[in-house]
């Protein structure tokens, strides 16, 4: 899989900006660096400044595992769409199902699990889903085993999506990130999408996205299906700047073409 900062990547960016794309982005590990505590995460200024310019030029969506309320104050700009809970919250055109009673039942069972409490797992209640964090556990292997054992005892069983030192628990009938991005493309009246993500939770988009979408994986791994990769999260700022420059060139070319068409013939 090629690096996005290549001749092939430049061509793909130039090609897709001419097709009225939706720009859909994950938050943690994509816009914001991974940090020890989720509450510390913020999008860097170099990224938010460019995104504030991009929202005037194409539809921009944040599609994140966080709740909409949580992520909104961490962005530093106002996107057109914010979809939270891995697609289950804030999705236009989708009639939401209230999963709170089910999530509360899982939460009660997990709080009552002795191994979970002993292992240093942090349980994050996001309303429509749960995240079990073990990054700060003294023994991550033991914490991971405790989480897996606790999940196996839940009823009904959740849809489980792994991540970087986290297990995400979702209702089985909740939309996933690919379904969310696909609906957003239609809602925004776009022809295609640009999607960037960094984690297992984003693999569903990489695996199912149409071949004409521009998909970018942060910190590439061998087994995923994105078209391009970035080596580090810090390269996202440069990617967004390249995208903005490509849009500006495309618009300038269109204006030049229209001006030439209006010139009187001799």
Image (spheres, helix red, strand yellow):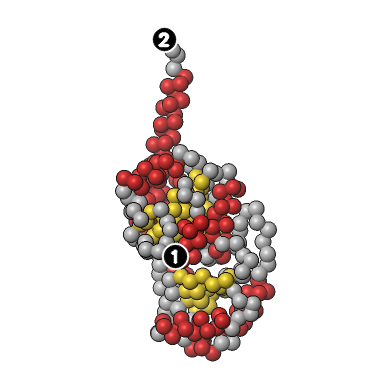
Q: Is residue 225 left or right of residue 113?
A: left
Q: Which residue is tagged 2?
A: 266
Q: Position of residue 177 (x, y in %)?
A: 54, 60
Residue position marked by numbered label 1 in the rendering: 199
Crowding near the residue tagged with mark 2, few <14, some 14–19, many ≥20 C-alpha atoms within 10 Å: few
In 3D space, how far apart are the residues under numbered discs 2 and 1 (Cα atoms)?
59 Å
Q: Which type of secondary structure does the marked residue at label 1 adopt?
A: loop
Look at the numbered discs 2 and 1 and tell me whether their residues touch, using CB distance below 8 Å. no
| Residue 32, placed above or below residue 108 | above
Q: Residue extending furthest left? A: 6
Q: Is residue 120 visible?
A: no
212 vs 201, nearest the viewer: 212
Question: What residue is drawn where x is 56% and y is 87%?
Answer: 113
Q: Give the percent coordinates (x, y) of residue 186.
A: 59, 47
Residue at position x 51%, y 81% from top?
148
Q: Residue 24's spot in the image, x, y percent? A: 49, 53
Is residue 197 left or right of 230 when viewed as pictured? right
Identify the mark at residue 127; answer none if there is no mark.
none
Above or below, comparing residue 179 to residue 19 in the picture:
below
Q: Residue at x 66, y 74 (%)?
A: 102
Q: Residues within 10 Å of mark 1 (few under 14, many from 20)?
A: many
Q: Nearer the viewer, residue 262 or 154?
A: 154
Q: Residue at x 46, y 81 (%)?
A: 144
The answer to which of marks 2 and 1 sits earlier in the sequence is 1
Q: Quadrant of the C terminus?
A: top left
């Amino acid at each position: 899989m090629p690096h996005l900062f290549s001749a092939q990547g430049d061509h793909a960016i130039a090609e897709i900006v001419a097709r009225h794309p939706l720009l859909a982005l994950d938050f943690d590990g994509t816009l914001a660096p991974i940090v020890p505590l989720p509450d510390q995460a913020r999008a860097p200024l170099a990224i938010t400044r460019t995104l504030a310019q991009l929202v005037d030029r194409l539809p921009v969506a944040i599609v994140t595992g966080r709740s909409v309320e949580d992520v909104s104050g961490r962005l530093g700009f106002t996107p057109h769409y914010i979809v939270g809970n891995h697609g289950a919250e804030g999705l236009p055109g989708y009639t939401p199902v209230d999963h709170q009673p089910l999530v509360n039942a899982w939460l009660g069972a997990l709080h009552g699990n002795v191994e979970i409490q002993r292992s240093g797992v942090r349980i994050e209640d996001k309303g429509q889903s749960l995240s079990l964090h073990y990054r700060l556990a003294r023994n991550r292997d033991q914490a991971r085993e405790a989480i897996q054992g606790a999940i196996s005892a839940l009823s009904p069983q959740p849809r489980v999506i792994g991540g970087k030192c986290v297990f995400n628990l979702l209702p089985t009938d909740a939309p996933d990130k690919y379904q969310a991005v696909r609906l957003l493309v239609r809602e925004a009246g776009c022809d295609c999408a640009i999607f960037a993500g960094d984690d297992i939770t984003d693999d569903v988009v990489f695996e199912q996205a149409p071949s004409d979408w521009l998909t970018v994986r942060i910190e590439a791994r061998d087994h995923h299906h994105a078209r391009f990769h970035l080596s580090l999260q810090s390269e996202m700022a440069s990617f967004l700047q390249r995208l903005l420059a490509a849009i500006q060139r495309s618009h300038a070319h269109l204006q030049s073409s229209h001006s030439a068409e209006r010139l009187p013939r001799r």
